[in-house]
Amino acid sequence: MSSPWPTGGGNDIWVPTGGYGFVRCGGVGEQFSLGGDVVPMPINAFVGTRGTIKDCPCFNIGRDVNSLRNAIVGLGTNEKVIIEILTHRSNWQRQLICKDYKGTCGRELIDDLKGDTSGDFQTVIIALMTPPAVFDAKELKRAMEGPGTNENVLIEILASRTNQQLREIRDAYQGEYKSDLAKDIAEETSGDLRRALLILLEARRDENCQGVDERLFKTDAQALFKAGEKRLGTDEIKFMEVLCLRSPSQLQMTFDEYKVITNKTIEESIISEMSGDLKRLMLSLVQCSKSAPAYFADRIHKSVKGLGTDEHTLSRILVSRSEMDLLDIQDEYMKAYGKSLYSTIEDETSGDYRTTLLSICEKGN
């Protein structure tokens, strides 16, 4: 099970941890030693090979639970211990900590963390403690709650996730809210944007990364030309069909052929032919098909440039990509903006929140 999205950097294809492995850790310095904790590693659609956070090889659940409890109880909170543990354990290891914490302490770890943290620091810590599919489901719900809908969040998540991730997000949403995600999105959006988002949510994209259908990319390029540049008005449905359902490798050949036919890039045509949220979604799909890390680097840059920082977007991207391709995102950020993501975070954030984000991306540039 591999992601169709190009990851850039040192890896062209994202390959998750597969099957069942074992972590045997008796303690620090006793990596994979006999007699340690033996824990089955689940297949995980949200784990890649270019993340900054990996499974801790000396993982000891009991030690982590005791350390976290000691950091939380009593006068004051030891934020340093909380950050050190939670940013150096993979998400599945954090879930094991949560389970053992409740069995040992009779309390929910997330509730204790919420009681002892606040603000942006609390937001990123709770995000780290949430299973990835549930986290995405909660972000989608948050984007649709209250007056108005945050279409940018819907676009970011649905345009960048793999078929398996989208299926897991749908299930997580149903489990969390006892509601159908497609139904809620249909109620909160309208027109062509709604149609395109629902196509993506069906998780029907071709994920064959190996071959390209030459006849199909030529047919698609001609169809896009006839749907846009060649006619008065735009046939948005044809653009949706191609951009939402073709594999990234197929799309790259289609875009090349399209430029030969029209002497324009696909981005130039989308900008001239479309507007508003649909234009943003189509451009996001094009960018993700070329390089998902470059797309997220751009999203991060937009979250920190200008007056004020969009901490929620910054936190969401760093946490959601921390086990997938954050190394590549940092490379793309440096390439595009001439400044490391690490130093940008140092400049744009503060306090325990900054310390947490820096720890998440500390292995990058």
Image (cartoon, grey):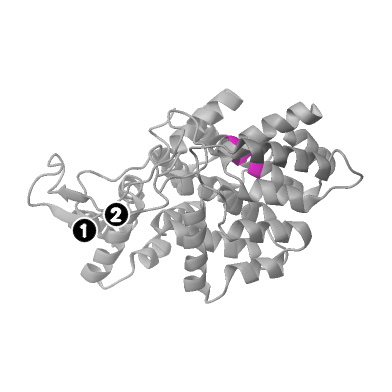
Q: Nearer the viewer, residue 298 or 292?
A: 292
Residue 94 showing in the rendered view = yes
Q: Which of 257 and 344 is in front in this view?
A: 257
Considering the whole magenta stretch, tell me its main secondary structure.
Answer: helix
**Rendered location of residue 52, percent (x, y):** 39, 38
Q: Mark 2 points at which residue?
A: 93
Give yes or no for contact between labels 2 and 1 (Cβ–Cβ under 8 Å): no
Give neighbour class at mark 1: few <14, some 14-19, many 20+ (Cα, 10 Å). Answer: few
Is 297 part of what is drawn in magenta?
Answer: no
**Rendered location of residue 306, percent (x, y):** 69, 37
Above/below status of 224 relative to 175: above
Give the residue drawn at x 71%, y 40%: 219
Relative to residue 121, is residue 67 drawn left or right?
A: left
Q: Name the residue under label 1.
A: 66
Residue at the far bottom: name it.
178
Give neighbour class at mark 2: few <14, some 14-19, many 20+ (Cα, 10 Å). Answer: many
Above/below status of 171 relative to 57: below
Is 286 part of what is drawn in magenta?
Answer: yes
Q: Which of 355 and 183 is in front in this view?
A: 183
Q: Which sits earlier in the primary sequence, circle 2 or circle 1? A: 1
Type of the residue with mark 2: Gln
Above/below status of 302 relative to 237: above
Question: Which region shows up in magenta?
Answer: 285-290
Q: Nearer the viewer, mark 2 or mark 1?
A: 2
Residue at the far left: name it.
35
Relative to residue 341, is residue 217 drawn left or right?
A: right
Type of the residue with mark 1: Asn
